[in-house]
Amino acid sequence: MGVPAFFRWLTRKYPAILVNCIEDNPSTDAQGVYHPLDETKPNPNGVEFDNLYLDMNGIIHPCTHPEDRPPPKNEDEMMILIFECIDRLFSIVRPRKLLYMAIDGVAPRAKMNQQRSRRFRASKESADKAESMEKIMNDIRNNGGLLPEDKNSEEKSEHFDSNCITPGTPFMSKLAECLRYYIRHRMNTNPAWRSIKIILSDANVPGEGEHKIMDYIRRQRAQPNHDPNTHHVLCGADADLIMLGLATHEPYFTIIREEFKPNKPRPCEICGQIGHQTKECQGIPKEKFGKNDELAAVHAVETRYIFLRLSVLREYLYRDLEIHQHLSFQWDLERAIDDWVFMCFFVGNDFLPHLPSLEIRENAIDRLITIYKNNVPKFQGYLTENGIPVMERVGTILISIGRLEDEIFMKRHEFDEQQKQRDRNRSNNYQPPNKRYRSSTDPSGPVHLPVWAAAPQLEPQPIGQKPQSNINNPAQANAQLRQMQRTDLSSTDSSDNRSRKRTFDEVEQETTDRPSFNQQDSVQDEEQANDPKDTVRLWEEGWRERYYKNKFNVDKNNIDEFRVQVAQHYARGLCWVLQYYYQGVPAWDWYFPYHYAPFASDFLQLKDLSVFFDKKTKPFKPLEQLMSVFPSQSRKFLPSEWQPLMTQKESPIIDFYPLNFCIDLNGKHFEWQGVALLPFVDEKRLHRTLEHVYSTLTIEEQQRNKRDYDRLYIHSSDLCYDYMKELYVQGGNEVTRKNPLDMPTMLSGGMAGSIWPDDDDKIKSVGEQIKAPLANCEEIINNQVISVKYRDLLFDDDYIFKSKLLENVTLPELTIKPRDYDQMQPYRPNLGFAQRPQYQRDFAPAQRFIRHSMGSQQQQHYEPGGFNPPRQSGGYYNERQSNDNFRPRQPYDNYRPRQSYDNYRPRNPNDNYRPRYQNDGFRPRQPGGYYPPRHQNQYNSYRPN
């Protein structure tokens, strides 16, 4: 989701939500016999998960164009990498009931506008990059250097256009075919896969991947056979997955994602080596690297995975959102969480531009919470109910923010000027005195903003034939230096490829990736640079008039009426987004018709605003979406008869595909962060034009363009097998999509829905042989897997999914202690969910090493000759267990210094799961009081990174 630095802010504010994943690995014994991992064994993380959901686009992008290793040579290698990634995630989570793979299908129109902007910019950047790379490689050859393809012709990779990761392309069709084979292969060969059900929702099923998953969860929990204590795990690095998980009100919900490592070395894109930038490449070394003169391999560090526990986040939110003053109604955590999710949309989302006065780095969410808690008693209720906002109350919150806008903009400018002065001082080797900048959450107090606040508004810059590189802009280079010097405060996800979806796509302003630069860029160069002229100047009087004149081209006399109109469109957008997260797609055709957001002070007339939409709308078909989001440079993925519509001057939709367009930095430093000023697609005109070329589609293109349904896979050992195989009995009842069968919930473990036969010609029945779609994969000799088409439960259009905990749910035990609430420091997470997982208990070697290292320290505190702590203290390892360096008990062993041990007690196993209270309530540490040194109980509470 487009919330700048949301994940970093969340994990710094609520550090205990993260734990590191524990992974088991296959082994090889002394005889060299390989032993594969047995995933049927208990999960080493200390908890058994039921359902694993994969947002597949978050897997597809890094596997097809990785950043930390050379790219795959062809599509077959990409498919293998995707298989391996799924295998690894499965081995970590080990789901016991369901695996759900969801690929992005056709998105709602509101999201397509963002996709259009990304793909247009990605295409332009790709063309410029290819031209630059060709020039560098020619220079290398002219200087006598060698390139990988000069030494080995097989080293040259096929050019991969990441825009093909869009529904309707041949690549996505091949991916779906390969995943269908992969599922069948794993279910036939891996015992852990046989006992679960698998749903594949490919790119022909409309909807974004994560929202298809949420729609499944939402509909399952609305039926009576759903287990309210189901443990869900959702894989993905998008910030909106946190919001979606909270919106389900499922207490056992966990997100698994890659651990972010800042400043990871990236190989050169030409020679594949580490240690220099691409523009500095001189080719591969000529000396040999091995017996066969092969190139030196880039040893990429394997990415680790982390769990984000939403159950712990709910504990934090309980503390932050609870209102202690007397209320005329019963305070409800579930309603408060819904309001918190809604307010986070004000700061940013994928469907609306963020409000100019709300930046997460300026404590925008904390400020919203303070205003919210001050107004809820006056409202005598909440902002939202079941995903439907109360607009009069929403307007009150926004107007309260609007009263602070003048001060916010002035402070933002002041800090920007202070940063410029620091750069001048740094260039002269002058060290200014340290100052602390503290942010206040009090909306009535002064607004303190951090030094890395957003820059002033800048006028749009045209993208022409050859835009200047960021490297040649000293002002941007110095801004990059400031960002790199504050890596710990920057966002957690980075990506060079701006075409990726969210986190693997750029996380929409959430990344801190910057082009490489020289840290010795001088301030003199910065001052001489021709920076874009700031035409808005939000810190000066008259900023509103200048903003609407420059951004919307509205005359000063019409601003008051126009800003109310824009604010009402934006408020409708907030309603659309909230319903999308809680009820499903409100309307497929709605979108915000402007490139910029209004100010918070513009939301003046919201009381009578309609919050409902027409649910009878339908999504685009895949090829229609391609025509809506692709630039003309990517037309090769379209049917041949459709491609001229993007290039011929007489085409009725040629204006949809500009070759040159403007980028408005809009307060940011870099073009990729700016607003692409592209024309909005006229849906009706597009459909009228395509009606004349639909008849030219081939059968294969028609298959790629159809709307499809999910596929459900089960093994022949599943209880539902006998029921489902009757769908394929000849002469049986005619079961179709219009006349499907209901899932037998008594046999399916409570899973509900409708099924009918899969009409794919490539489907093979049980006992037959299945050929592999890839050359390096093996055939399935005796297939034991059956697949059917699957559809979620259907509900009436006016049905409202309730935002509440289900009855008979058992809430998880509390995890954080009261003293952990205000811990604003880097968190060193647990390994897994259990306090002491089984694999951690054999600590004898490590404890002997630590005890030996601490021996000299103990001798400094006690009598000469050393001191052995009493065995009953629980703080040290019992020496009798190891027999190493064991000696008879000495007389002075009975000595126990009062100061060190009288106040010590062993750590209770439940300390990590619920707060520790005394009879008179929790008593925090008192100044001057004694508490045992950390090293005395570190073994029972050991928490490695």
Image: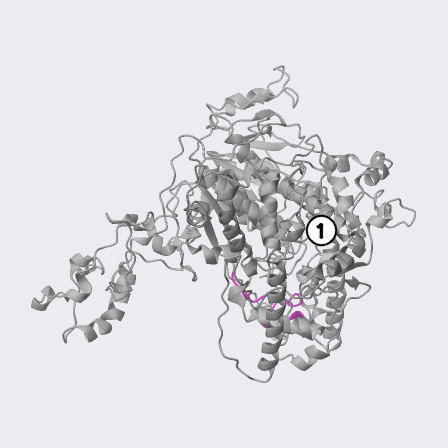
Q: Nearer the viewer, residue 187 or 204?
A: 204
Residue stretch in magenta: 261-278
275 part of magenta stretch: yes
Q: Within the magenta stretch, is there residue 864?
A: no
Identify which residue, 291 or 890, lies in the foreground: 890
From the top left corner, tell me how far across and down residue 670 is, in percent. Answer: 68, 64
Q: What residue appears at the point 66 percent right and 44 percent down from the top-left corner?
A: 571
Q: Residue at x 79, y 49 (%)?
A: 635
Q: Is residue 533 above or below residue 433?
A: above
Quadrant the C terminus occupies? bottom left
Task: Name, please, the residue furthest toward the left.
Answer: 891
The residue sitting at 70% across, 55% down in the picture is: 160
x, y percent for residue 348: 61, 52
Could you tell me if residue 385 is visible in this image? yes
Q: Is residue 3 above or below residue 897?
A: above
> Element type at marker 1?
helix
Q: State the image coordinates of residue 540 (x, y, percent, origin top left).
A: 69, 66
> Vertically, is 18 above or below 284?
above
Q: Nearer the viewer, residue 17 or 287?
A: 17
- The residue labelled by disc 1 is 163
Taking the image as shown, residue 861 lies to the left or right of residue 254, namely left
Identify which amino acid the numbered label 1 is placed on.
Asn
User: In the figure, residue 798 lies in which quadrant?
Assistant: top right
Residue 129 placement (x, y as % from top left) = 73, 64
Q: Nearer the viewer, residue 44 or 648?
A: 648
Q: Badge 1, how many Cα within 10 Å: few under 14, some, many 20+?
A: many
Magenta: main secondary structure: loop
Query: Compared to 843, does 855 lie above or below?
Result: below
